[in-house]
Amino acid sequence: MSDATTAAEPIAALKERAGVVNALIDGTQTVLVRHPTLDPGTIDERFALYPAYSHQEPGRYQSRYENYYYRASAKPDAGVPIRAVADVHEEYTVSSDDLEALARHYVYTPDGLRDKYDPDDDLRVLLLRVAELESPAIVEERPAYRGCRAWIDLEADADVDREAATPVLDDATFLERRAAVRDTLE
């Protein structure tokens, strides 16, 4: 076993809707839009993506991406699948008005994001480099993982090796997406 799985330290995980996590793993989505008041967590190191199955709404998805909702509309009985890790490569602050320009980089509609966050203030946009785990983990959903918060610490017994993962986008594709996001926001 690697040091990542035998260490007694918890593993940082970002909670996000299961459909969005699947889109990130498929390489369809490269950014996360978050409310600025959500706990930013520790984004300076690689973290696990923890799919959340509550509060998903099919109407928030762009019609061409509704399949992500339907593929992830119910939590598996065996536990929560941790299939990927991510690194934040860039972070932006944007107004709600900027969401239309970014729409090709995420699966929700701009109005779906506004509905989700009801933004009075600016929103945070995180450009993620996602990597799929070589060995996905099934994690028991513990009471400490529930609730409306962005970041959780997976117990040390969660078998998530953050280093044994392959980027879902090759370097050239990721750099193209990164440039497209920069061009949109800068």
Image (cartoon, rainbow, N blue to C red):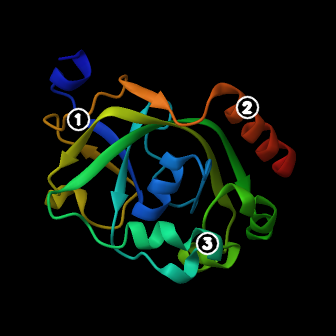
Return the residue nearer the eye: 29 or 4.
29
Which numbered tag is attached to residue 113? 3
Q: Say which quarter of the image contains residue 33.
A: bottom right
**Mark 1 to mark 3 CA distance (whole Å):** 30 Å
Residue at (26, 34) in percent of width and height: 160
Of labels 1 and 2, earlier in sequence is 1
Which residue position is annotated with label 2?
A: 175
Question: Where's residue 145, x and y in %?
Answer: 23, 57
Viewed as shown, does residue 140 lie left or right of 66?
left
Which residue position is annotated with label 1?
A: 10
> Tag 1: residue type?
Pro
Of labels 1 and 3, earlier in sequence is 1
**Mark 1 to mark 2 CA distance (whole Å):** 31 Å
Q: Residues within 10 Å of mark 3 (few under 14, many from 20)?
A: many
> Tag 3: residue type?
Leu
**Mark 3 to mark 2 CA distance (whole Å):** 25 Å
Q: Say which quarter of the image contains residue 11.
A: top left
Residue at (73, 38) in percent of width and height: 178
